[in-house]
Amino acid sequence: MPCVPIVDLLRAGVTTPRPDPALCATWLASVYESIKGAGGAVTTSVEEPTVGRNYHRIGVRLGDHQPLRVLLNATVALAAAAQKRDPHLINLVFAAVPGREIYRRAVLRVATPAELEQPIEDRSLRLLTDEERRDVAYHRPGRLGDLLFNWF
C-alpha cells in the first residue's frame, strides 16, 4: 500500500466496521510474526469489531512484559497499537507497532502514534458520509486516531 498521509484515509465508510476475513487473516499473521520477533507473545484471541468499536484488536505482551493491543481498521487496511488500559476509558493511548516492516510487507499501512495524535480538522471530514459527519459532531473525537479507531 502506498504511504499516504493518514488524513487521506478519511473517506466514506472509514468509521464503520467492514468484515474482511482475508485482510484480518493477513493482519493476524503479521501480529504473530512481529510479536514473536519482539520476544513477546499473543495473550488474547482476536476481538472482532462490535457495537461501540469499529476495529479488530488483539492483546499481546512484549518481551519486556509490556501489555499492548494491536489494532486493525479493515476499511482502510490500517494497523496501529495502543497501550492496554482500563476498558471503561474510551480514549486510546497509542503506541508504536512492533515490527512495523512485517505489516508493510503484508500490504498494511501502519500508523505511528504521532500520526494518530493529530487533531481533526473540519476540512478532513469532507469525504465522510453524512451519517459519519453527524457521529463526529455528536461524539467529538479530538484526534485522527479517535476517528480511525473509534468507540461510536
Image: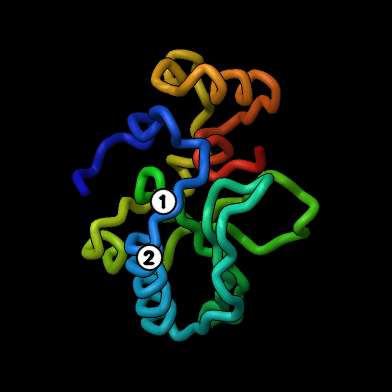
53 vs 39, left or right, is right
For label 2, the crowd category at 10 Å Cα-Cα, with few meaning under 14, some 14 to 19 and many 20 or more, is many
Coordinates of residue 95 in the picture (x, y in percent): 52, 56
Dots 2 and 1: beta carbons under 8 Å?
A: yes
Q: For the point 31% across and 63% down, which residue is it?
A: 103
Q: Which residue is mark 2?
A: 27
As shown in the figure, which amino acid type bears the numbered disc 2?
Trp
For label 1, the crowd category at 10 Å Cα-Cα, with few meaning under 14, some 14 to 19 and many 20 or more, is many
Q: CA distance from mark 2 to mark 1?
A: 9 Å
Q: The C terminus appears in which quarter of the rendering?
A: top right
Q: For the point 21% across and 64% down, which residue is it?
A: 105
As shown in the figure, which amino acid type bears the numbered disc 1?
Ala
74 vs 60, left or right, is left
Q: Is residue 150 above or below residue 20?
A: above
Q: Between 147 and 113, which is closer to the camera in this rendering?
A: 147
Q: For the point 63% across and 52% down, which residue is it?
A: 50
The image shows a total of numbered marks equal to 2
Q: Earlier in the sequence, mark 2 or mark 1?
A: 2
Helix, strand, or loop for circle 1?
A: loop
Q: Between 18 and 111, which is closer to the camera in this rendering?
A: 18
Coordinates of residue 142 in the picture (x, y in percent): 61, 29
Helix, strand, or loop for circle 2?
A: helix
Coordinates of residue 55 in the picture (x, y in percent): 53, 51
Q: Which residue is mark 1?
A: 74
Among the 4 quarters of the image, the one containing residue 98: bottom left
43 vs 21, left or right, is right
